[in-house]
Amino acid sequence: FVVLTTPSREEACELVAGMEVAVAEEEPPGSVVTARSVVLGVMIGTVTTMENIFYGVKYGYTVTNNISAAILGFGVMKTLVRVFGWREFTAQENCVLMTVAVAATAMVWGGSMPFAVLAMSSEIREAAGFGSADTDTWEPSVAKLVAYSAGMCMIGFFLAIPLRRKFVVERPLPFPYALAAAKTIKSLHAGTDDFSQPRFLASCMAPAMAFAMLTWSFDGSERVPLFGTRAKDKYQWQYNLSVAPLGRGFIVPARYILSELAGAALASGLLLPVAERRRNEWYPADAAGFQGKDAYYLMPAILAVAADSVYQLGRIAALFLYPAARSALASRRRRDGYSEPLVQSETPAKPTDRRWLLGWGLSSIVALLAFRALFNTRYDMATIALLSSPAWSVGITMACGMTGSNVASSCGKVMIMLFAAWYGSTGHVVQTLALGALSVAVIDQALDLVRDFKTAHLLNASPRAMFIAQTLGALVSVFTSAVLYYYYVTSVSLPSSNLPAVVARSYRGLAFTFAGGLSELPDYCLDISLLCGALVLLFNIIHDLAPPAYRPFLPSGVAFAVGIFLLPGQILMEVTGLAARTLWRRLHPPSADHRAELLGAALLAGDGLAGVLQSALQVAGVDPPYSCSYSSWYH
């Protein structure tokens, strides 16, 4: 898999193996979880918890902030070391701090608080127009939110143990963001007398944060129409002036960004225009969400991601369950020039530790009982949600490992549709949303820990230390996420023009609409969605059958599916970052190879810090001072 992320196999091996060897020579083996790394990680995680709640309500997505946490932790800890004369702050300790900070935010996105939980509220019910005020709303107190978070705070962590073995140790995936975080930490801790790398990060992070605050101050200025406001409003042809996707363009391999661009072009260039042209013929003109025009790109994206997950799971199952398939692939790899074995291990072969099954089973029982008490969910449905999540986790982890994109929410939407159709009536919106959130929690938590395992692996840090750090951070997140979420949603008016809560409304629409089954979709939507899923399967099959020399030029199925979902706005900014990175490498290859990923990490960190400030201002009642639009541009 590493060969797919770089222009040549030799460069891939040199990139990953060279980095691991360099770090191993500089750092002692193992890692310790120190009190100072845990305390500072919790403090940073508490701040980013509020940021993620704000991002989820305003933009419909959350961010992990692993790179931001590492940079902030390094700056604060180095200052404290100088002032108090403490011992040096090591790269491995920073890795632990980063893991605690990320896990301390876990229940915001893992618990789907700005999405599924918010969709249960009476405010979203009134805005979306779906459901009864008596039976289809849930207005939790802080205590109920704590119980909700505690019920599933550990359920995905045990599943990450076998996923780490497969995708970090035996068959390593690149995980672009984990690689960027490891490279950032390594650069920060390169030497006590070398401050060039920290200065470079700071010099890039400050302008990124300033630009993010500038676009926030002029609300609406970041959404620039590409082909006029009509194309922007009807087909989503716009250019998002955001530094986060720009930074992503400096990190993610070109193959995946261009595949995302192809998916976005299909959505805005064909699917939405055709749906708009067939208004009143395929669906009512006043229909919205999954009953209107948006269904013609949302459903294809969801089924495309589902098709890729099923394919990847089936591929892995065939390789590890059927010796004939494994022998055929090994023979093909030898014919293609690969000298290393199909499965590599960092330690001599030994029996697989199955204790994770006990932990996962016990945490699943806790989740079943908690959801039954809080939402009166059916045991059979909750069991299906839990048992299907490991299968989803395999495909989603592979997707994130290759592209850096977390599309776990798409799986959550599929499960919401399934359970809504299973209930078969519109009086179970809350239960349906809760079961969808449970599915997302397992996938998100497992993926989050596997990504941290990858960073730890590159920094030669202890996996046991990562698991302990994740556990401590998750336990803290149970309380901080519940308190901050409750305070936020009771302090601001939702939804509003500045805080539209689009994803929460779409979640509620899904749970209500699909109570009637797939027949509730507009005409031909399912047919188009199945074609997109088949196209993703075709991309995957062609890629796996093609010679290695051609694979970097073939589209990625999962990235194509993600592009349909994201639409052109963010992806065009990623393409801008990719173009800048390519030009940089042409003009000055040594500098680009050394600092391109650091620049991307700095841009992501700057945007993350700006998000923290924006969320604090929003809670304080400070709205963007100016509002902008491009309505005067040609139609």
Image (spheres, helix red, strand yellow):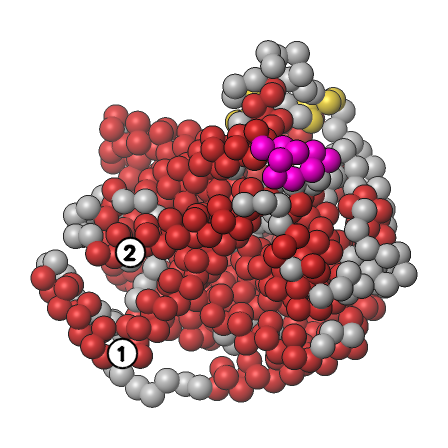
Left or right, 365 with respect to 189, comes to right
Q: Examine the residues drawn in magenta and state their main secondary structure.
A: loop
Q: Is residue 450 above or below residue 182?
A: below
Q: Amino acid at mark 2?
A: Ile
Identify the residue at image location x=65%, y=72%.
152
Q: Which residue is mark 2?
A: 541
Residue nearest the observer in this picture, 411 or 83: 411
Which picture quadrant has residue 58? Answer: top right
Circles 1, 2 touching at the beta carbon (< 8 Å): no
Q: Residue at x 68, y 48 (%)?
A: 506
Quadrant location of the N terminus in the rendered image: bottom left
On whether residue 283 falls in the magenta region, the answer is yes
Q: How many marks?
A: 2
State the mark number for residue 135. none
Q: Is residue 554 above or below residue 33?
A: above
> Image quadrant of residue 234?
top right
Question: What residue did someone put label 1 on?
Answer: 322
On screen, residue 19 versus residue 249, left or right, reads: left
Q: Secondary structure at mark 1?
A: loop
Q: Earlier in the sequence, mark 1 or mark 2?
A: 1
